Image (tube, rainbow, N blue to C red):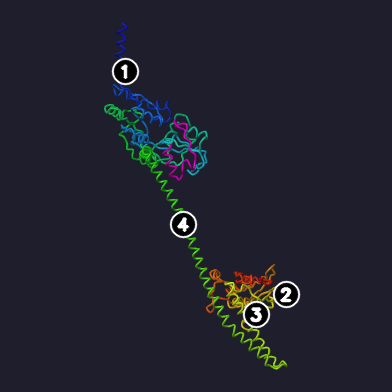
Amino acid sequence: MKNIILLTLCLLLSPALMAAQWTIGVLALRGDAVTKMQWQPLVETLNRAVPGEHFQLQPLDLAGMREAVNQQRIQFVLTNPAQFVQLNSNYHLRWLASLRGTREGEETSKATGSVILVRRDSAIATPHDLIGTTVGAVDPLAFGGYLLGYKALHDAGLRPGDDFRLRFSGFPADALIYLLREEAISAAIVPLCLLESMDKEGLVDKRRFRALLAQPSPQPCLTSTALYPDWSFGALPGVSDAVADAVTRTLLVRHAGDTYRWGAPTSTSEVESLLRELNQHPEQQRLGLTIKSWLIQHQLALGILLALLLVALANYIWVMILVNRRGRALEKANDALRSQQQALEQAQRMSLLGEMASGFAHELNQPLSAIRMYAQGCLLRLPDNGEPQSVREAIGLIEKQAERGGAIIRNLRQWATSESGADNGPTTWTTSGVIDTLERVWALLRMTQVHPGVSLNIDGDRALTVALPPVLLEQVLANVMLNAVQAGATSLWVTLTREEAHLALTLTDNAGGITPAQMAVIFQPFRSSRQDGMGLGLVISQRLLRNIKGDIQLENQVAPDSRQGLRVTLALPRRPMEA
C-alpha cells in the first residue's frame, strides 16, 4: 500500500520536478515587495503559457543586476534601456519585447523620463536657485533617477557636483521623496510617475510638490525631461531559441484586462546618443579599460621608455643650462670687448687731444711771450710822467691778456703731459675770491653787451676763496657760462656752498637741459650738439679739475623760474694740492 502511494506522488510531482527553472531579474525601482507585487502576474502568465518551463522573479538593484548577469544567476532581464545598453556591451542580450504606453489613444514606446521635484513652498524657482543646495538622486548610473535630470540641469547651465551637492539614496527610489518632504534635501531627481504612484497608494500628497523645469508630457505625470523608450524584456545568450520564442509569443499576445502591453523591441539609438553625450556609454568606458589593460601589459617597456624620456629631458635641460651659461659668458665677453673698444677709442681721442694741446701750447707760447715783451717794451718807451694814461691802460690790458693766455697754455701743457707723469701737478697756486672771479669772467665775456637779455644771479659769501692754478677757474667758468648762453639760457643762477675740503659751485640755467643720449657722451671729445662746436670744452674742463683733485658733474634740473635746465656742479679744492 505504501509503495502505491509513493508511486502516485511521484507521478503527480514529476512534471514540476522535470520543468526547467528560469529566473527573471527585474530592476527593483521601488524595492522588492513592490516589484514582486507589480510583476508577479507576468511571471504567472509565462508559467501558464509556456508548458514544461518554470519562471521565477528576482528583484535587483543596478549593481545586483550586473552581478547576477555576470554570475549567470538569471536568464532574463526586465529593465530600462540604459541598463540594457550597459549589459549588452558585455553579454550580448536579445531584446524580446518592449513595453508600450498609451498617448491620446495611441500606443507609444516612450515612457521613461525624470522629474526634478522641489517642495511647493520652496523658494527655488529656477535651476540656478539650486546653487549651494543639496540635490538628491537614486544612483550615479540610474537612468530616470539621475542621468536624465543631470542632462537637464547641465543644459540649464549648471555643473552638478560643483554648483550644488549630490546625495544618492540608492534603491528604493521612494526614499528620495520622503527626504524631500522632510526637507533633508532641497530637490530630488526621481523617475517619471513615481510621485503619482506614491500619491495613489496614499504614501505622499503630490500637491505638496512641484516640478522644476516642467515640460509638457503625454503622460499624466510631472516631467522635467524628454521621454525615452520604456522598459524592455531581454534574454541572455544561454536561453534557447525555443524558450525565447515561446516567451516572446506570450508577451506579444494581448488579452483584455492585461496590465502591460508589449510590442516589438524599440531602438536604443537615442539612449546610446545620450549616454555618449554624458560620457557613460560602455564603449567609452571600454576604451579606458583597454588603454589601462594595454598599459599594464606593457608596463616594463613603458617604464624603460619613460626612463629614456626622462634621461633625454634631463639631458636637454642640462644642455640648455650650458647654452644659457655660455650665452651669458659670451654676452659678458662681448660687453667687455665693447667696453675695451670704447676705452681704446676714448684713449685715442684723448691722445689726439693731448697732442693737439701740446702742439697748440708749443706754437702759441712764443707768440704770446713776444706780445707780452712788446707790450712791456711799449710801456718802457712811454714818458715817465704817466702820460698818456689811456695808452698805458690799453697796453697794460694787452700784457695781462697775454699773461692770461700764457697761463692757459701752461694749464693745457700740464693737462697734456699728466698722463706720462712728466709733470703731475701745477707748480704755482693762487688764492682768489670765487665771486670776484665770476664777475670778472662775466665782464671778460662782455655778456652785458653781447647778450643783454641774460642775467646772472649769485648766491654766496663774497669772502669765499679757493686756491687754484692761475686762470684755471676763469677758464672753466668761461666754458660753462658760454655753453649755457649759447644753448638759449636767459638766466644763470650760481650758488656757493662751503664743504670740508671743497667749495661746491653750482651753476643752473633755464636752457631746457640735454637729452639722455647727449648726457651719456657729454665728456667724450669731439662730440658737440652745435654745428660749430668742437666738443672739447667740457672734456678739457673735467681733465683740468680732476688734475687738481676737483671734479665737474652735470644733471638736468628745474631752474628757479620753473623752466627745465641744466645744473653744473664744480667741486673746487679750498687748499693747494700737496705734491
Q: Nearer the viewer, residue 120 or 104?
A: 120
Q: Which residues lie in the magenta part? A: 146-175
- Residue 218, by quadrant, is top left
Q: Is residue 11 left or right of residue 372?
A: left
Q: Which mark is residue 326?
A: 4
Where in the figure is residue 42, as x and y percent of width and height? Answer: 35, 26
Q: Nearer the viewer, residue 175 or 445?
A: 445
The residue wearing badge 1 is 17
Q: Nearer the viewer, residue 567 or 93?
A: 567
* Residue type indicated by callout 1: Leu
The residue wearing badge 2 is 463
Mark 4–mark 1 Cα distance, whole angstroms, equals: 92 Å
Helix, strand or loop status at disc 1: helix
Q: Is residue 423 above or below residue 198?
A: below
- Category of crowding for the residue at label 4, using alpha-carbon neighbours closer than 10 angstroms: few (below 14), some (14–19), many (at least 20): few
- Residue 154, by quadrant, is top left
Helix, strand or loop status at disc 3: helix
Q: Is residue 23 above or below residue 365?
A: above
Q: Which mark is residue 442?
A: 3
Residue 541 counted in the magenta span: no
* Residue type indicated by callout 3: Trp
- The answer to whether residue 474 is seen in the rendering is yes
Where in the figure is residue 548, as x and y percent of width and height? Answer: 64, 72
Mark 1–mark 3 Cα distance, whole angstroms, equals: 139 Å
Helix, strand or loop status at disc 2: loop
Which one is in front in this view, the residue at disc 2 or the one at disc 3? 2
Where in the figure is residue 99, as x and y percent of width and height? Answer: 34, 33
Labelled pair 1, 3 in contact (Cβ < 8 Å): no
